Image (cartoon, helix red, strand yellow):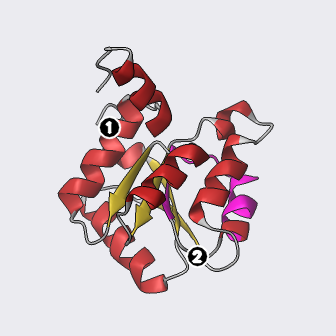
């Protein structure tokens, strides 16, 4: 990863406490220790008002506000740093509609459950090195520009 791994700040957003624990454990095995957790989109927005992570890992399907809706709220933020926060959507539903919704919301990437540490850390690395949204990458590829 481009930054010292131990310096990366990660926000985990998932209504499932066990999933947050699993992701935290995967991150800690890679020496990523500055991890904060939110059990809902509303809680995540409260955290983001006072803390600036380098990346957010967001569950797609949550009660109340979905991960896609949270991503839209982040992209609409008046704080430019927050509006550019890389967001990886995590979903158990790898169907085209879910991916399209994540892309339309402004997600930088998505991961389909189940996944392993290598996949998670690889996606984090890619998003930190090239923080383009899915939609921006698709547009670049359509123009014949390889930005991976």
Image quarter (top left, top right, bottom left or bottom right) of the N terminus: top left
Front residue of 9 and 142: 142
* The magenta segment: 43-59
Q: Residue at x 40, y 36 (%)?
A: 128
Quadrant of residue 125 within the rendered picture:
top left
Q: Residue at x 75, y 42 (%)?
A: 76
Q: Which x, y percent locates residue 110?
A: 39, 53
Q: Secondary structure at mark 1?
A: helix
Front residue of 49 and 85: 85
Residue identifier under label 2: 62
Q: Secondary structure at mark 2?
A: loop
Which numbered disc covers residue 126?
1
Which numbered disc covers residue 39?
none
Give the distance between the C-alpha atoms of the residues marked 1 and 2, in whole angstroms. Answer: 25 Å
Query: Does the magenta portion include 52?
Result: yes
Q: Nearer the viewer, mark 1 or mark 2?
A: 2
Q: Is residue 6 left or right of residue 46?
A: left
Q: Which x, y percent locates residue 51?
A: 67, 51
Q: Earlier in the sequence, mark 1 or mark 2?
A: 2
Crowding around mark 2 (Cα neighbors within 10 Å: few <14, some 14 to 19, many 20+) is some
Quadrant of residue 101 within the rendered picture:
bottom right
């Amino acid at each position: 990863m481009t930054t010292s791994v131990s310096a990366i700040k990660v926000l985990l957003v998932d209504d499932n406490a066990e999933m947050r624990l699993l992701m935290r454990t995967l991150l800690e095995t890679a020496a990523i220790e500055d991890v904060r957790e939110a059990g809902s989109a509303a809680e995540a927005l409260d955290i983001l008002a006072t803390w600036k992570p380098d990346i957010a890992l967001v569950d797609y399907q949550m009660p109340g506000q979905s991960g896609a809706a949270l991503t839209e709220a982040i992209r609409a933020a008046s704080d430019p740093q927050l509006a550019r926060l890389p967001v990886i959507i995590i979903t158990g539903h790898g169907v085209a509609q879910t991916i399209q919704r994540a892309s339309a919301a402004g997600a930088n990437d998505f991961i389909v459950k189940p996944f392993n540490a290598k996949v998670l850390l690889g996606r984090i690395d890619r998003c930190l090195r090239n923080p383009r949204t899915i939609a921006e990458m698709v547009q670049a590829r359509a123009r014949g520009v390889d930005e991976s």
